[in-house]
Amino acid sequence: MPLTSSPEHPQPLRAVVAATKEWVERLNPIWVEGQLIEIKRRSGPTQFLVMRDTLAEVSVSLSTSQAVLDAAGPLTEGTVVAAWVKPTVWTKNGGLTFECRELRPSGEGRLLAAIEQRKRMLQAEGLFDPARKRRLPFLPRRIGLVTGAGSAAERDVVTTIARRWPAAVVETRHTLVQGPLAVEQVIDALRALDGAYDVDVIIVARGGGSLEDLLPFSDEALARAVFTCRTPVVSAIGHETDTPIIDLVADVRASTPTDAAKRVVPDAAEQAQQVALAVGRVRQAIVARVQTEQRRLDDLRSRPVLRDPSASVDVHVERLEIARQRLIRAMDVRLREETLGLSHTIDRIRALSPRATLERGYAILTDADGAGVTTVAATTPQATLTARLADGSLGLVVTEIEQEQAWRSSRK
């Protein structure tokens, strides 16, 4: 029933909102296309989105469940989606919103969602692991290049390599770089270059393009082929903002084909300059070291012991001479003392010697048996005696014996 009203009899707001809600909810659900410009994730079961028309400045709010968002795959702001929505009115504020019952990425959004899902799968398998990425050789013998025939990417890579390192050798494999046959041709070219014994690095290069044009370089088969290559692979696909899956699997990601060429070969002029700087630093280091050692040598030579090495010896020679003189004097004194002592000892011995007694006029008497005669009682008259004097001996015959009275008294 239509609502009637007048200034005197206005309708309550709740009745108007309820009638509007009833009329709006008679509409059937419908699929609409738009771009997600805001995703408001909450902890509760209801999530809110803001969708805008792809051409006009028209935007609406969407409410949906967490299950619908998860089923749509990874979504980011800016993704174009197709939403199955049913309009409704919130009674509390009278706001018009759309209940989203299903959500699907469309156009580029669908492609981006599929690529994102593929990235997560390959990442879980370890194809993006930084630990397995190999270092590029400093100066490769031969550089493999996979690119489109006559493309700007080929020209940029070859020209840059020739300018930076003229002696570098580039082996090119031309393939399609977009379309359904591109993946197979790129994989075949990769395997051929990877099997060449003298190819030390491989560049996969392509210029910029739309998401659909770059889609072959996010193919799972190509990603696995790059992963299994024994030769380091440099990916140079599109512009710096483009990130196909091959960029994540390759050992090195270059922002452009020119950047890839700069990464695989050094700059000859720059290397020559670095060598010159290194030689200069080595020379400076050698000169500084020689100067340092020369100063140390000069300091050593300035020391008295090295300036006149014999000076210290002369001091010891002088001391040795003084000690020798002291020793000689001590020996002379000691020799004189010992000589004097020996002379005194000899004099004492000589004074006690019988010969000294004989030299004073005494004689030693012995009988015929050689026994000493010290008393008159020890001989008899007519006995033969021998008198030993200082200069010889005398043969004597006892003619008379006279014993002194005093001697006899002392004997008693």
Image: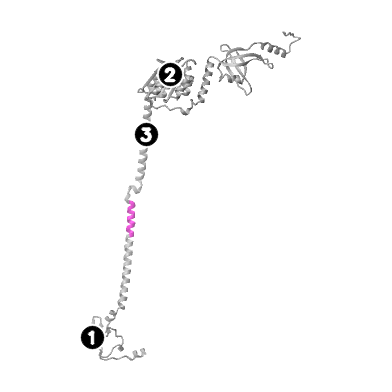
Q: Earlier in the sequence, mark 1 or mark 2?
A: 2
User: Would you say the residues marked 3 and 1 are in contact, meaning their CB atoms lie under 8 Å apart?
Assistant: no
Image x and y of residue 190, in percent: 42, 21
Q: Mark 1 — residue? A: 395
Dominant secondary structure (helix, strand or loop) of the stretch shown in magenta: helix
Q: Specify the segment rendered in magenta.
A: 311-323
- 234 above or below 31? below
Q: Going by the picture, which residue comes out furthest to the right?
A: 8
Instruction: Please give left or right for residue 131 compared with residue 65 in the image.
Output: left
Q: Mark 2 — residue? A: 186
Image x and y of residue 170, in percent: 37, 21
Classify 10 Å Cα crowding around label 3: few (below 14), some (14-19), many (20 and above). Answer: few
Q: Mark 3 — residue? A: 282
Frontmost residue, 182 versus 252:
182
Examine the image and state in which quarter residue 98 appears: top right
Q: Secondary structure at mark 3?
A: helix
User: Would you say the residues marked 1 and 2 are in contact, meaning their CB atoms lie under 8 Å apart?
Assistant: no
Q: Earlier in the sequence, mark 3 or mark 1?
A: 3
